Structures are given as structure tokens and as C-alpha cells.
Image: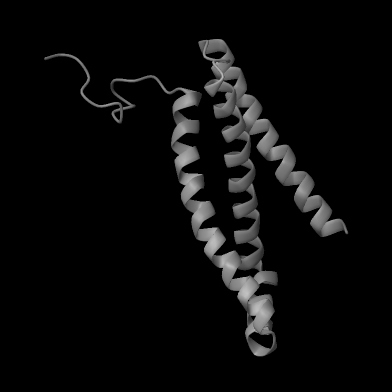
Amino acid sequence: MDRPISPFMFPSWYRFQVTSALSIFHRITGIILAVGSILLTLWLVSVAASGPLFEAAHAFMVSPIGTLLMIAWSIAFYFHLCNGVRHLAWDTGHGFELRQARRSGYIVLAMTVALAVLTWLFVFLF
């Protein structure tokens, strides 16, 4: 049997495709969003509790690690959102041609970067 048996053998059998990477990244960002949502809920509980719990949560959120985690969460959010819109277009039967699928993948990446940069410029400047 000389045919490939698994699509996870990228280096030896399959050529890298943007659509494959975006599919994998869509799943990863879903996991990141789930974990980030738990952290967001904990932060909201600390806001409601006020006092030392809120002070500790706020200190973590404004720390470099907290800021980095929030930036990563927002990037995951925007990617998942844009790629979800792309999948909605596919559900209507549009964009299945290889060229269109590749182009829409690059549009998803560009929109993710643009939305994340605009969000964090707004946060840091205002």
C-alpha cells in the first residue's frame, strides 16, 4: 500500500495548505476562548465581590502577563469570529472553489490582525 494513511503526515505526504492550518487554528482558538471565558467569569465574580479579591484580580489583569493573556484572547476571539463568518458563507454554498477558499483564508487572517490592532490601539490610547 503506497498511499498516505493519515493527513497528519504533512512533511512527507501532503503539501501545506492555508485552509488546513486555519482549520486546525480554528479548533485551537475555540479551546483558548473556552479557557479565557472561564478567566473572564472569574474576573466578573471578583468585580462583584469587590475588596481584596478585586484588587488581586485587577493587579493580575494589568500586569504584563495579564495584558499578554488578554491580547492573546482577543486575537483568538477575532480569528474565531472571522473564520466562523467564513464557515457561514460556506454553509450557504459559497466560496468552495480552491482559489476562493484560499483568498477567504487570507482575508480572515488580515481581518483578525486589523480588528485586534484596532481594539488594542483603542484600549491603550483611550
Q: Quadrant of residue 116?
A: top right
Q: Is residue 10 above or below residue 115?
A: above
Q: Which residue lies at the image location 30% right of the left edge and 31% below the top edge?
A: 8
The answer to whether residue 53 is visible is: yes
Please identify the quadrant where the C terminus is shown: bottom right
What residue sits 50% from the left and 32% below the top? 22
Of residues 45 and 61, which is closer to you in this image? 45
What is the x, y in percent for residue 123? 80, 57
Q: Residue 4: percent from the left, percent from the top?
A: 22, 19
Report the front residue among 84 and 93. Answer: 93
**Residue name at image x 46 percent, y 51 percent:** 31
Q: Quadrant of residue 106?
A: top right
Residue 61 percent coordinates (x, y): 66, 70
Question: Where 121 falls versus 89 (above or below)?
Answer: below
Among the 4 quarters of the image, the one containing residue 36: bottom right
Picture coordinates of residue 125, whole percent (x, y): 87, 57
State whether residue 120 is above or below residue 60: above
Left/right of residue 52 with respect to residue 6 in the rendered view: right
Residue for point 62% across, 85% down: 53
